[in-house]
Amino acid sequence: ALPPPEAPPPAAAPPPAAAPPRLLLDLPLDVLALVLSPLPPNELANLGLVSRAFHRGPPPQQPPPPAVELALRLRAEERGEALPAHLPPGERSWLQHLLALEALGDGSGALDGGAFFSCFVSPEGELLTCGDDHAGLLEVDGAERPSGLLGQGGGEPQVWVPTPVKPLQGACVHAVACGEQHTLALTAAGAVYSFGGGRRGALGHGGTSDVLSPRRIDGLASVRAASVAAGAYHSLVVSRDGGLFTFGA
């Protein structure tokens, strides 16, 4: 009789699976930056200040940017921001520089108002206005003249509920700033529009005429604006590269 066949050798045990990361700081640096990038800028700044652990980078190469800085760089990339290759003169660190860009990117705000009108920016980037387009203005040839306070083209003297400004629909307005009788609208692309009373050159169009509907400021066509502000009869624009432009009186 033949001997019984030998039993096959036991299968080798599979290698133990790598333990999943247990802590946030156990994540790879690029993954950690992705996790951090949705945080508000103030929380990213706090992380950079209170926890040195978020300043680490994997050895032994030249130290890469820390996780908080990488998160801010990802946010800048999502905004279409072109960052310089080297830290700009006068800046102490990339972290501070990137946080300053975040602050500029916030614009002037989602709402503002003048003497007789109000402006609002919706979460979808739509500009809405309401108020009295003729209030406080002198009569011309026996009739009140529209001033463009509302940016609605002057067709309606009073608008009592927030109403979309049609000429700017689709422009994705990011922020708005109002003077006494004029308005600046900043788009997400960095373009600046103005409308309303042109007294003392507050609109930036090279004259003092009123503008009934939003008009892009030609003198800023080559500038990518980051923030706008307005006084009674003057306006200010800050560019993405830190330039300051003023007009009016």
Image: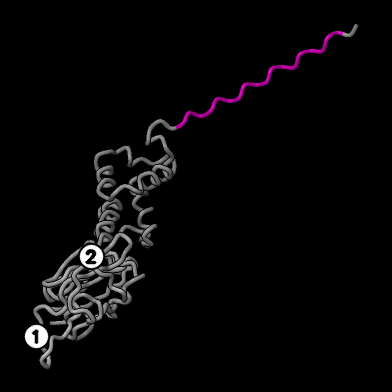
Q: Position of residue 199 (x, y in %)?
A: 13, 82
Q: Quadrant of residue 241?
A: bottom left
User: In this image, 220 relative to 137: left or right?
Assistant: right
Residue name at image x 22 percent, y 77 percent:
195
Residue name at image x 30 percent, y 66 percent:
126
Q: Position of residue 185 (x, y in %)?
A: 25, 70
Q: Can you identify the residue that label 1 sits on?
A: 138
User: In this image, 199 relative to 42: left or right?
Assistant: left
Q: Check the image and name the residue furthest to the bottom.
A: 141
Q: Answer whether residue 160 is magenta in the image.
A: no
Q: Over which residues does the magenta segment extend?
A: 3-20
Asked if residue 69 is positioned above or below residue 244 in the image, the reply reads: above
Quarter containing the N terminus: top right
Which three-letter amino acid code belongs to the residue tagged 1?
Leu
Residue name at image x 41 percent, y 46 percent:
62
Residue name at image x 21 percent, y 85 percent:
206
User: In this image, 242 relative to 14: left or right?
Assistant: left
